[in-house]
Image: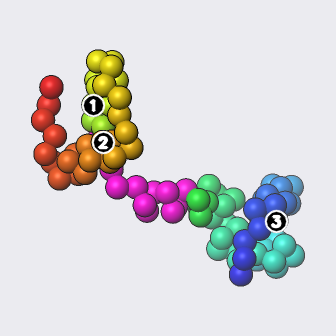
Amino acid sequence: MKVNEASIQEAIADLKSQKKPNFSATAKIYGLERTTLAKQYKGQHTSMKTAMSTHKQRLNNAQESVLIKHINYLTNRGIPLTSQIVHNMAEKIIQGLVRKN
């Protein structure tokens, strides 16, 4: 079943107007899966875009912070960075080969 963001938002608004939210009936009205609607309503569901971004992310937050520090260090010294240089730095961080300054 294809999820339509507008339908989810309308269904959530409908649920909020109900004295006791009925997820099954509301999901049926808006053509949604009950579990998807319930998770969205409770704030437990992430968007597909967020899920894919998290899944594809190669650096964790600490590694990303190290990369940013290295980028800032080099740019503050006037060293121009290409995407390939940044990519190589990221690969070294992933492999644990970056030295602390």
Residue at position x 15%, y 25% from top? Answer: 101
Q: Which numbered disc flags the more N-terminal residue, 3 or 2?
A: 3
Q: Amino acid at mark 1?
A: His
Rendering coords of residue 81 (x, y %): 35, 34
Compared to residue 60, the image places residue 8 above or below, namely below
Q: For mark 2, give the secondary structure.
A: helix
**Res. 64 visible in picture:** no
Q: Kindly identify which residue carries mark 1.
A: 70
Q: Residue at x 82, y 65 (%)?
A: 7
What secondary structure is found at the residue carrying circle 3? helix
Which sits in the foreground, 88 or 26? 88
Which picture quadrant has residue 41?
A: bottom right
Whether tag 2 and tag 1 are in contact, CB under 8 A, the answer is: no
Disc on res. 85: 2
> Toward which corner of the image does residue 80 lie, by quadrant?
top left
Q: Which residues are magenta?
A: 50-63
Vertically, is 4 above or below 85? below
Q: CA distance from mark 3 to mark 2?
A: 44 Å
Q: CA distance from mark 1 to mark 3?
A: 44 Å
Indicate the amino acid at tag 3.
Ser
Disc number at residue 17? none
Residue 56 inside the magenta-drawn segment: yes
**Whether label 1 touches label 3, CB < 8 Å:** no
Q: Earlier in the sequence, mark 2 or mark 1?
A: 1
Q: Which residue is mark 3?
A: 7
Between 55 and 80, the one nearer to me in the picture? 80
- Residue 64 in the image: x percent, y percent? 34, 41
Image quadrant containing the N terminus: bottom right
Secondary structure predominantly adopted by residues drawn in magenta: helix
Amino acid type at image mark 2: Ile
> In the rendering, at what x and y percent does residue 4 appear?
77, 68
